[in-house]
Image: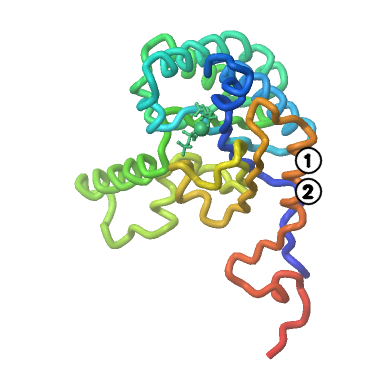
Amino acid sequence: MSSEPPSVPRHIAIIMDGNGRWAEKRHRPRRFGHRAGQKAVRQCVEYCLRHGVPVLTLFAFSSENWQRPPSEVSALMGLFVKALDKEVDELHAHGVRLNFIGALERFEAPLLQRMQAASHRTRDNTALQVNIAVNYGGRWDIAQAARTLANEVARGQLKADAIDETLFGARLCLSELPAPDLFIRTGGERRISNFLLWQLAYTELYFTDTLWPDIDAACLDAAMADYAGRQRRFGRTGAQVSGEPVAH
Ligand code: IPE
Ligand code: IPE
Ligand code: MG
């Protein structure tokens, strides 16, 4: 029997890139693009609900994005606060579970409290889990997992020799979920930008030039169709994966 993975991804991870350029093309301030990007997030969540994608992880703010001009950073923080105030009721009504990953302690109390309240309120929802990566970096994630393990060893709860990929992976963000099947980056750049470094090891990568605020169902259909046509081999041969008799 072949072990073909289902053609609908169990987990999609997205770098939502291109908001600034979308605004600049319209001679508007960059924050205008971030606001337009919020609508695209809504479309994307609806798409996942409609198509039975159970997990969606969105990169909203990287650990490196603090280096942007203070006015853009504060516009983004203000937008996050407003978005949570505006969207959580409806997301909850649709059965969406919200989860935030990243070094959340860096955020100011009004935003942090809203994130915690939204996670708590939606924690029993099962239609779709949306993970929002904020002040997240793949290297940070790996470092915090290493620190956690080192502390466990120091306390005598764990032997250093017992650390393997499974144990390490279990200390990373999203460890309770399947790894992303499909990664999408909008906005034309072909890089990972310190997103989920460990978790993307065998993810199918899809890049589109479409700027994030322009993302719609047709763009997501194209990514899903591309994904459905991939053969995922995980190191094996094509014949092994497709269930053909193995040639010796
Ligand atoms: C992505 O869009 C949103 C964040 C990083 C917060 P950008 O703001 O990076 O948009 P471009 O890449 O400059 O167009
Ligand atoms: C990645 O986009 C981070 C987010 C989308 C939140 P960036 O625009 O920050 O990435 P680089 O700087 O082009 O690599
Ligand atoms: Mg960018």
- What is the three-letter code of the residue carrying label 1? Asp
Residue appearing at x 55%, y 31% in the figure: 131
How many angstroms separate mark 1 from mark 2 (CA)?
Answer: 6 Å
Q: Residues within 10 Å of mark 1 (few under 14, many from 20)?
A: few
Q: Position of residue 79 (x, y in %)?
A: 52, 13
Cβ–Cβ below 8 Å for labels 1 and 2? yes
Quarter that holds the N terminus: bottom right
In the foreground, 175 or 205:
205
Where disc 1 sits, the SS reads helix
Q: Give the number of the disc on residue 221.
A: 1
Q: Position of residue 233 (x, y in %)?
A: 64, 66
User: Mark 2 sits on what residue?
Assistant: 225
- What is the three-letter code of the residue carrying label 2? Ala
- The answer to which image quadrant residue 246 occupies is bottom right
Q: Give the number of the disc on residue 246.
A: none
92 to the left or right of 143: right
